[in-house]
Image: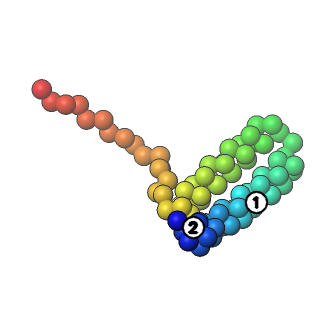
Amino acid sequence: MEAFNGRFQSILDTAARRRVRAYAVKVGIGTAASRFLLLDQAIVLYACMALLRELLMLWGCDPPRFRRRCFCRARS
């Protein structure tokens, strides 16, 4: 387990820290340049969702997409 943490997990954590830092800078610049509260909120929300998607992909998870879901009724 220590070998896993030392090699693989530390590489993922480093990559994740870089992504979080990059998004934090982007959001900071975007909200500083914006004068409107609604635009600030949209920038933050978009960045949070994009960061979450990237982190899920980094860790090997398939992020859910907005799909049209069909609910089938059980036939009697």
Name the amino acid type tagged 1: Arg
Residue shown at 69% from the left, 51% from the top: 47
Q: Which residue is mark 2?
A: 2
| Classed neighbour count for the residue bearing mark 1: other residues with Cα under 10 Å, few (<14), some (14–19), many (≥20) | few
- Left or right of 35 in this view: 66: left
Residue shown at 63% from the left, 67% from the top: 10
The C terminus appears in which quarter of the rendering?
Answer: top left
Name the disc covering residue 21, or none: 1
Could you tell me residue 57's position as x and y percent? 53, 61
Q: Of helix, strand and loop, which one carries label 1?
A: helix
Name the amino acid type tagged 2: Glu
Specify the farthest residue to the left.
76
- Left or right of 35 in this view: 13: left
Distance between the alpha carbons at the discs numbered 2 and 1? 26 Å
> Which one is in front in this view, the residue at disc 2 or the one at disc 1?
2
Foreground residue, 56 or 12?
A: 12
- Left or right of 53 in this view: 31: right
